[in-house]
């Protein structure tokens, strides 16, 4: 390939890393928070799909994209709360409960979302970082999801909170040593449920990014397994919110190589 072709491919991969990596970022941050508290949520795929449907429905029915984002966040929190409640029952395995929640969330989304496959909903506004260029390819590649700065801010705040705040240290203690947390009088079940629910809300923003920005529509194959991939992404990032940013960009860029070529 000549220099122009290499530039086009590189630009396409960069744009893909930004667009595809944004949902990965939110879902991985949600799973990072959940796993820091000592619980693995394999139900994130169901959370992502259901929140994507709810976000599209909220935007379509109200005509306001920000209401769609709120709907996605709260629906993600709701599905994650179900996972937290079920996992808190005696003799219930987190992994098995997560698989059940994944099937429940996806099934509900497919059933409730059938009327939403054709309509178009108001989309998230884009931040244009490529206005300096005359090239339409550059401008398209540098269109930033308006939720991406929020995701980057969340990553920084979570990294800071886990190191320097009482609540962050409590979440880490519950994940590292539940017996020590109980000995100090803290509710391990309560902390894990709160972390799981908040993690689901953060992951729900990834669902909103899918249906309200890229690809910007609702269909039953919208997530392509990104919820499950995010669990591996968190392990790859060594449970660090800041490393999740780089890992999400890497995974997003890897997914964009094929279409770019």
Image: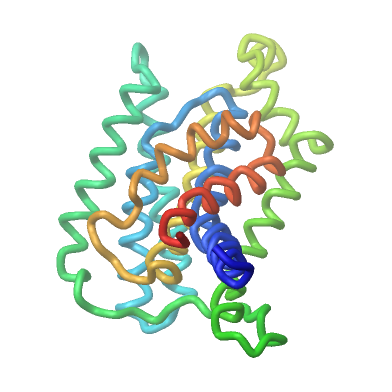
Residue 202 visible somewhere in the drawing: no
User: How many numbered dots are placed on residues in this image?
Assistant: 0
Residue 1 placement, left or right of 112: right
Q: Quadrant of residue 7?
A: bottom right
Of 89 and 39, nearer the camera is 39
Examine the rendering and report whether any part of residue 54 can be seen: yes
Please tell me which residue lies in front, 133 or 237: 133
Choose between 6 and 222: the one closer to the eye.
Answer: 6
Q: Residue furthest right?
A: 164
* Residue 216 % position (x, y): 38, 71
Residue 214: where, in percent of width, then height? 43, 67
Placement of the N terminus among the 4 image quadrants: bottom right
Quadrant including the C terminus: bottom left
Q: Quarter of the image holding residue 105?
A: top left
Counting from the top left corner in percent of width and height, residue 116 is at 22, 70
Q: Residue at x 60, y 72 (%)?
A: 4
Above-or-below relation of 205 to 66 = above
Q: How is the image coloured?
A: rainbow
Q: Is residue 201 above or below residue 147?
A: above
User: Residue at the bottom extreme?
Assistant: 134
The structure residue drawn at horizontal position 33% and vertical position 44%, both measured from the top left corner, is: 46
**Does 107 appear above or below 69?**
above
Q: Is residue 158 above or below residue 51?
A: above
Please state the horizontal and vertical placement of residue 64, each as a whole percent of the image: 43, 81
Judge from the rendering whether residue 107 lies leftward or rightward of residue 246; answer left or right. Answer: left
Along the line of sight, which residue is nearer the eye, 47 or 7?
7
Residue at left 44%, top 32%? 41
Q: Residue sitting at 75 percent across and 29 percent down?
A: 169
Q: Is residue 125 left or right of residue 211?
A: right
């Amino acid at each position: 390939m000549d220099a122009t072709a290499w530039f086009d491919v590189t630009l396409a991969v960069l744009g893909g890393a930004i667009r595809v990596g944004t949902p990965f970022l939110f879902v991985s941050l949600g799973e990072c928070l959940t796993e820091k508290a000592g619980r693995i949520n394999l139900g994130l795929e169901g959370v992502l799909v259901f929140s994507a449907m709810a976000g599209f429905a909220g935007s379509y029915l109200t005509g306001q994209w920000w209401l769609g984002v709120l709907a996605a966040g709260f629906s993600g929190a709701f599905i994650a709360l179900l996972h937290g409640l079920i996992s808190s029952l005696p003799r219930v395995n987190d992994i098995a409960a997560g698989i059940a929640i994944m099937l429940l969330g996806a099934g509900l989304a497919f059933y409730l979302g059938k009327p939403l496959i054709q309509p178009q909903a108001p989309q998230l506004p884009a931040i244009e970082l490529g206005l300096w260029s005359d090239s339409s390819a550059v401008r398209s590649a540098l269109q930033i999801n308006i939720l991406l700065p929020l995701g980057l801010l969340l990553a920084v705040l979570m990294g800071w909170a886990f190191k320097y705040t009482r609540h962050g240290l409590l979440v880490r203690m519950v994940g590292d040593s539940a017996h020590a947390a109980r000995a100090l009088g803290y509710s391990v079940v309560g902390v894990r449920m709160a972390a799981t629910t908040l993690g689901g809300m953060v992951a729900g923003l990834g669902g909103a990014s899918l249906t309200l920005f890229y690809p910007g529509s609702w269909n039953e194959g919208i997530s392509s397994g990104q919820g499950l991939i995010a669990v591996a992404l968190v392990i790859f990032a060594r449970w660090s919110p800041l490393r999740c940013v780089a890992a999400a960009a890497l995974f997003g860029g890897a997914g964009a190589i094929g279409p770019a070529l």
